[in-house]
Amino acid sequence: MKRVTIRVPATTANLGPGFDAFGCALGLYTDVTFEETDFGLEITGCDEAYTGPDNLAYESYCAVLNTLAEEVRGVKIHIDAHIPICRGLGSSAALLVAGAMGANVLHGSRLSTQGLLNITNAMEGHPDNLAPAFLGGLTASMVDGGLPVSVSFPLHPDWVFLALVPDFNLPTVLARSVLPEQIGRADAIYNISHGALVLKALELGDEKLLRTAMQDRLHQSYRKKLIPDYEKIQALIRTTGAAFCLSGAGPTLLCITRNKGLKGMLEQKLPAITEKNWQVLPLHIEFEGAHIIAQE
Ligand code: HSE
């Protein structure tokens, strides 16, 4: 039977003002192995709650086979996930990308990356995590006529992304439910202008510009009430001169800096301002998108 293992990087979406549009791949991975069988579904390596047909890797696997007009027979899926679940680091997107790539590779790689992005975007609803998971690096995406268009942007190599990952999770559906349906013109202008300058600051490695540009009026202020001690941690990070944002829909908070000594300082000061346990995880930018790591 044919077997393939796909490695997908973690992703941080939004990067402040780029709500549902910007994303960046980071050096933390989920590996998923797909092995064709004659009949049935078997999923291992994850909590039993995720072993049914609503597993995202299986759903995207089936969606790709349907597009290829291939019969869905049996499959064994083994998940080796290092991306924390429901923390705002793209764990769901990683499963969707792995399933789509796995099915495509096992059936002759007939679909392009754009084709796989189209299918998974229709499932996820926004391409901001999916695009960097497929392409690596920094991406900005739009959805036009229902289809995602994603472009890669240059990134200065000296950035350090410190992910502050808490010991609680936040379902994206809840983090989206608190957002307003309508926003005012001033807030729209604020986010468009800040978003453009975030991309330039990330390219130039300009920490001062990034710190100023990485502010938002579309989602973070509505979501912060769902994350204990958000404001205290934001204030601590901003005293260091680093840029701050929510990673995706949260609850992970992101500190983006060129100061390599900041991890120790944050670990030392966090316990005094929060009762929650926040792991400070230094993550490098991952320039390689999802790819095959084993195939038989
Ligand atoms: N852009 C999305 C959000 C990312 O902020 O809700 C999470 O999927």
Image: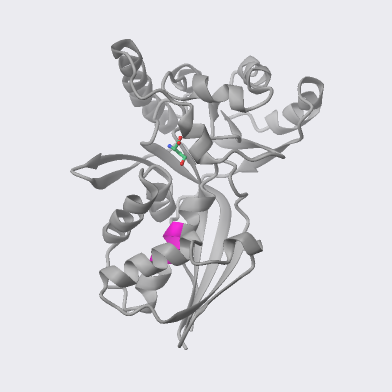
Q: Classify 65 as above or below 238.
A: below
Please indicate whether residue 109 sits to the left or right of residue 241 in the image. left
Q: Classify 69 as above or below 173.
A: below
Q: Residue furthest left?
A: 145
Q: What is the span of residues highlighted in magenta in the rendered image?
A: 96-100
**In the rendered structure, does residue 228 fall within the stretch colored magenta?**
no
Q: Main secondary structure of the magenta part?
A: helix
Q: Nearer the viewer, residue 274 or 175?
A: 175
Query: Whole-percent x and y of residue 2?
Result: 45, 85
> Which residue sits at x=52%, y=35%?
174
Q: How is the image coloured?
A: one colour
* Residue 291 seen: no
* Residue 185 seen: yes
Q: Classify 270 as above or below 138.
A: above
Q: Classify 200 as above or below 138.
A: above
Please indicate whether residue 288 sits to the left or right of residue 84 in the image. left
Please indicate whether residue 293 sits to the left or right of residue 252 in the image. left
> Which residue sits at x=33%, y=21%?
182
The image quadrant that residue 72 belongs to is bottom left
Query: Whole-percent x and y of residue 131?
Result: 37, 48
> Which residue sits at x=29%, y=13%?
185
